[in-house]
Amino acid sequence: MLSLVIPKGSLEKQVLDLFSAADLTILRGGDRDYHAKIDDPRVDRVRFLRPQEIPIFVSQGIFDLGISGRDWITETGADVVSLGEIGGGRATDSPVHVVLAVPNTAPWQQVEDLPEGIRISTEMPNLTASYLAEHGVKARVFPSAGATEAKIPDIVDAIVDLTETGSSLRKAGLRILSTLLTSRTELIANRDAYQDRAKRAAMEDIVLLLQSALAARGQVLLKLNVAADDLPALLQVLPALGSPTVMPLADPAQRAVESVVPRRGINTLIPALKAAGAFDILELPISKIVE
């Protein structure tokens, strides 16, 4: 029913892991294979392409669904429907930032200080030109095919590039002058396909599965037993995604408790629960949380 295009490159592993966690495992012959499939009746075609290309192909109806960053959606000006964010900007959950960077020795302190005719290299010339025009800067923008920071200072005077932490720019002797855009990975849909009732229902199913897998990240299920008299004190210690589930046991003096809690801090939480009277504590992984 749906055709889906997946990004190659830095987003690839993040997306594959998420689809696998959502029980939408993407199957292909090898890492170099650009064709794939999902054992799901809602998806009949899967392709891999560069994220820069995906927004345009989705907007033109070549694919119903695609995954790309907000940076490339903005750069291409693609008219697509965003179905929500599904991850960070590259290989982690952190967003990436499109920044304007200049040499540490440059006198400019804000974008409005840039002189007329300044040379700027970037892989996002449309986004850059639009941003500079908004700030009244008349620049010469040169499209870059990679290694953008290496073009300073003999080829260009400044760059617009992607960064997560800015560390690579600092190592290159550059400082960030301004941030043009903060970008995360998005699931996008073709507008006509989204208006089709059957396709839209299938899209909403896929969004639900992906969001439930995202919600489960960093969470675990704790199951434990506690004496009924110790229950109030234990509940003061126990964090929960929602209200903990408390159930009676065969022994009327005991209670069973279940709760979804953050994995981070579990190493200190379990001893604290033990000290509060918990016993038979189990920590279980979870793959989805459907709210």
Image: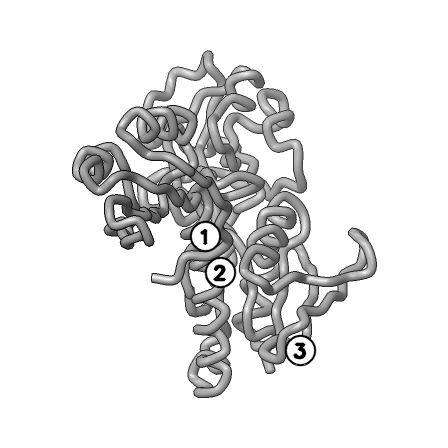
**Inter-mark Cα distance, 2 to 1:** 6 Å
Name the element at disc 2. helix
The quadrant of the image that shows the C terminus is: bottom left
Q: Looking at numbered disc 2 in the image, what kind of residue is underneath it?
A: Leu
- Mark found first going from the N terminus, 3 or 2: 3
Q: Which residue is mark 2?
A: 210
Name the element at disc 1. helix
Q: Is residue 271 left or right of residue 187?
A: left
Name the disc covering residue 44, or none: 3
Q: Residues within 10 Å of mark 2 (few under 14, many from 20)?
A: many
Name the element at disc 3. strand
Q: Which residue is mark 1?
A: 214
The residue mark sitting in front, 3 or 2, is 2
**Inter-mark Cα distance, 3 to 1:** 24 Å
Q: Residue 86 in the image: x percent, y percent? A: 47, 54
Give the quadrant of residue 97. top left
With respect to residue 95, does 244 lie above or below? Answer: below
With respect to residue 10, does 246 lie above or below? Answer: below
**Inter-mark Cα distance, 3 to 2:** 18 Å
Give the quadrant of residue 137. top left
Q: Is residue 95 visible in the rendered structure shown here?
A: no
- Residue pictured at 54% horizontal, 63% vertical: 55
- Residue pictured at 61% horizontal, 32% vertical: 148
